[in-house]
Amino acid sequence: ELKVEQNPLFLSMQEGKNYTIYCNYSTTSDRLYWYRQDPGKSLESLFVLLSNGAVKQEGRLMASLDTKARLSTLHITAAVHDLSATYFCAVADFGSNYKLTFGKGTLLTVNP
Amino acid sequence: DSGVTQTPKHLITATGQRVTLRCSPRSGDLSVYWYQQSLDQGLQFLIQYYNGEERAKGNILERFSAQQFPDLHSELNLSSLELGDSALYFCASSVVGGITDTQYFGPGTRLTVL
């Protein structure tokens, strides 16, 4: 069974600082997704990473995928308060018809 | 606004009851997914339909069933409800349901079982 682990689960940072959220997964996959969820809201797709070495950037967020290490990172640059949310990674499981398995999420709080 | 609609937004019911959650995908999307989000289990994939046919099954209980109709809307039926079924149920849709597709999530239905 595919397992997806995110860390940290809670992250409190100051505005202007940089930090990285890590997503490790247990079986072979080269399809990884990052989502954002605001409190009480739905999930918003941030990035779709489709191959080893894939890197995507949008504003202050950059995601990368290392399929050999079974690791994806979501890097936050010069955080601002608007980035406060819960971030989920999800991995497509080849063994189960590509169903998505989600990590537990990282609750990010950016303080002024 | 993702373009995916779900009704109702909130549902409060009693144990043992049966409810139906409805989802309308984005215009043009053929695939619909159902997810359950709870504090205990996190986000879990339940089931996927593509153009009316079941495509993938996740951690869906036998008490739960779903279908996708010819107009592509989908319904998730939850029966013999238990307290532990209280959760946020999301529907998502994508164009063809392939692994490169982006899934667009609806606003969710919050189910409370008392």
Image (cartoon, rainbow, N blue to C red):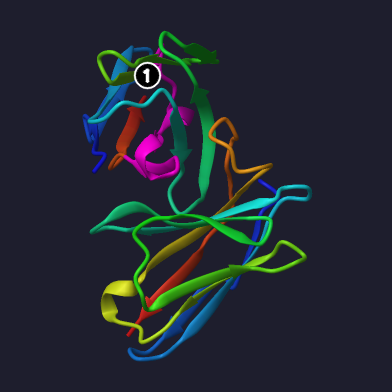
- From the viewer's perspective, tell me whether residue B63 is left or right of residue B105: left
Residue at the spot x=46%, y=35% of the render? A35
Answer yes or no: is residue B36 visible: yes
- From the viewer's perspective, tell me whether residue A39 is left or right of residue B101: left
- From the viewer's perspective, tell me whether residue B53 is left or right of residue A75: right
Answer yes or no: is residue A90 visible: no
- Given residues A53 and A110, the one toward you in this image is A53
Classify A63 as above or below B40: above
Q: Mark 1 belongs to which subunit?
A: A
Residue A8 percent location from the top left of the image: 21, 29
Residue B31 percent location from the top left of the image: 63, 51
> Would you identify the image quadrant in which residue B86 lies?
bottom left
Mark 1 neighbour density, 10 Å: few (under 14) some (14–19) many (20 or more): some
- Residues in magenta, as a range: A75-102
- Given residues B53 and A5, the one toward you in this image is B53
Residue B59 percent location from the top left of the image: 34, 59
Residue A83 covered by magenta stretch = yes
Classify B77 as above or below B34: below
Q: Which residue is mark 1?
A: A15
- Given residues B13 and B56, the one toward you in this image is B56
* Identity, as a three-letter code, of the amino acid under mark 1: Glu
